[in-house]
Image (cartoon, grey):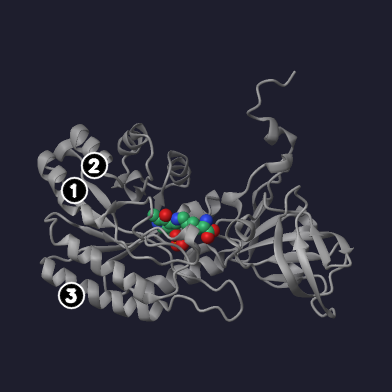
């Protein structure tokens, strides 16, 4: 999308505004499908990255199924037209009643703890197949907060507890149709995926009824110019080889699942904001924008880099700024960042905002969350309106 289209969208819909480019989602889905063309690979989009219904519908149109982590996400996927059997529920220590609801809704379940496995056995025995989420004890990911497969992580059942798992499975005659692992997010080394897959393949030999190996998500996309990303071609070739060997030893062709979030939607999204105040301080120059950690929390929460463009003055002289929000917290988007000179009113674009942008937004400081536009096949559609006071008050009961 070029700058003038984006600026026009802000004139039409105001700022802050999330804009998504459907062609990038299409490209990413295809690249993953192409990399795994030689195996029965299924994509289960980790929709926590972005649950806008228009994006979920686009995924459905592209043949992508969904991984959900809550009943809320499940309802969204159903609303977007998914059939329950296209949904997998991957809980993290949720109340068991929530798991019951997901089973009753018809989703597949990734069991993530021994107590849940026991409960599953007591409640469903051999009547309800499930998958088991293993913790492979492999450390990988962009930062400590988003690593999920290492031995100290809360996620999944440690692969070291395989004997305990087998005891429960045998006691209740559970039908385990899949093994799952998710090592972390922002993983650039193909080796981490290979290492984790070897752990899962080895464990899988103990389960006779498997239909699915789910290797999770976590592929790294480029946030910073020059960033190393997951080499999808190499990963596809190497995992395909390992998976085919595994299927041969196992004696049957299985499905290979992936659950990417960022890979599918990070690069499609931009958060467009307006520069409000340029503060030339003796220590440094600040650009304040009409947004903050309430709309894009990744820089503040993980120290994540988001590339910033000045769409209104791309050829301006280079200056260095701290780009900061309007929230009463230190909500710094970027420190000492070189940008073409920013003037009040300029439109800035934060790139890679399609994943974990809007879905992690909040009403902090009683501020409204942004609108969202999807541009796809030549059409720009407002797919979420700007909020109003009513949205802030909707759940308050003491109005008068
Ligand atoms: N599968 C499971 C079980 C997950 O927990 C996650 C992410 C994914 C798949 C998708 O991971 P992805 O492909 O998007 O890396 N808010 C953080 C990322 C947290 C990811 C949580 N789980 C961020 O903005 O960096």
Left/right placement of residue 150 relative to residue 51 reads left
**Disc number for residue 386:** none
Instruction: Examine the image and state in which quarter residue 135 appears.
Output: bottom left
Residue position marked by numbered label 3 in the rendering: 245
Residue position marked by numbered label 2 in the rendering: 117
Q: Secondary structure at mark 1?
A: helix
**Coordinates of residue 33 in the picture (x, y in percent):** 38, 71
Contact, mark 1 vs mark 2 (Cβ under 8 Å): yes
Residue position marked by numbered label 1 in the rendering: 165
Foreground residue, 219 or 42?
Answer: 219
Tell me which label, 1 or 3, sits earlier in the chain. 1
Foreground residue, 283 or 142?
Answer: 283
Q: Residue at x 33, y 37 (%)?
A: 99
Q: Secondary structure at mark 3?
A: helix
Residue at mark 3: C-beta within 8 A of ligand 1: no
Q: CA distance from mark 1 to mark 2?
A: 8 Å
**Mark 2, other Cα within 10 Å: few <14 / some 14–19 / many ≥20:** many
Residue at mark 1: C-beta within 8 A of ligand 1: no
Tell me which label, 1 or 2, sits earlier in the chain. 2
**Mark 1, other Cα within 10 Å: few <14 / some 14–19 / many ≥20:** some
Q: Secondary structure at mark 2?
A: helix
């Amino acid at each position: 999308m070029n700058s003038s289209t984006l600026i026009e969208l802000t004139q039409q819909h105001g700022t802050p505004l999330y804009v998504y480019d459907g062609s990038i989602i299409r490209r990413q889905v295809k690249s993953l499908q192409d990399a795994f063309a030689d195996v029965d690979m299924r994509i289960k989009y980790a929709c926590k990255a972005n649950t806008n219904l228009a994006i979920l519908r686009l995924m459905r149109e592209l043949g992508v199924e969904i991984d959900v982590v809550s009943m809320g996400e499940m309802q969204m996927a159903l609303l977007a037209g998914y059939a329950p059997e296209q949904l997998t529920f991957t809980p993290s220590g949720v109340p068991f009643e929530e798991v019951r609801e997901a089973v009753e809704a018809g989703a597949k379940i990734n069991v993530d703890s021994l107590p849940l496995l026991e409960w599953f056995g007591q409640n469903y025995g051999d009547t309800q197949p499930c998958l088991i989420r293993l913790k492979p004890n492999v450390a990988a990911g962009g930062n400590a907060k988003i690593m999920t497969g290492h031995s100290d992580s809360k996620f999944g059942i440690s692969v070291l507890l395989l004997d305990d798992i087998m005891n429960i499975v045998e006691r209740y005659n559970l039908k385990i149709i899949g093994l799952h692992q998710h090592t972390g997010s922002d993983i650039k080394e193909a080796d981490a995926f290979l290492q984790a897959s070897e752990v899962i393949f080895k464990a899988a030999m103990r389960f006779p009824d498997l239909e699915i190996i789910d290797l999770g998500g976590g592929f790294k996309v480029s946030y910073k110019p020059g960033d190393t990303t997951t080499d999808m071609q190499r990963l596809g070739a190497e995992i395909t080889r390992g998976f085919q060997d595994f299927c041969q030893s196992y004696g049957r062709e299985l499905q290979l699942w992936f659950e990417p979030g960022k890979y599918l939607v990070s690069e499609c999204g931009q958060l467009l904001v307006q520069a409000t105040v340029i503060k030339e301080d003796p220590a440094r120059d600040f650009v304040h924008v009409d947004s903050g950690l309430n709309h894009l929390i990744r820089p503040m929460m993980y120290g994540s880099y988001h590339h910033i463009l000045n769409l209104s003055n791309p050829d301006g002289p280079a200056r260095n700024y701290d780009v900061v929000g309007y929230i009463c917290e230190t909500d710094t988007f970027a420190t000492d960042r070189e940008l073409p000179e920013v003037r009040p009113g300029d439109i800035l674009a934060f790139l890679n905002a399609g994943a974990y942008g809007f879905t992690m937004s909040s009403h902090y400081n009683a501020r409204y969350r942004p609108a969202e536009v999807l541009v796809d096949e030549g059409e720009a559609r407002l797919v979420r309106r700007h909020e109003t006071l009513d949205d802030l008050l909707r759940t308050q009961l003491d109005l008068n």
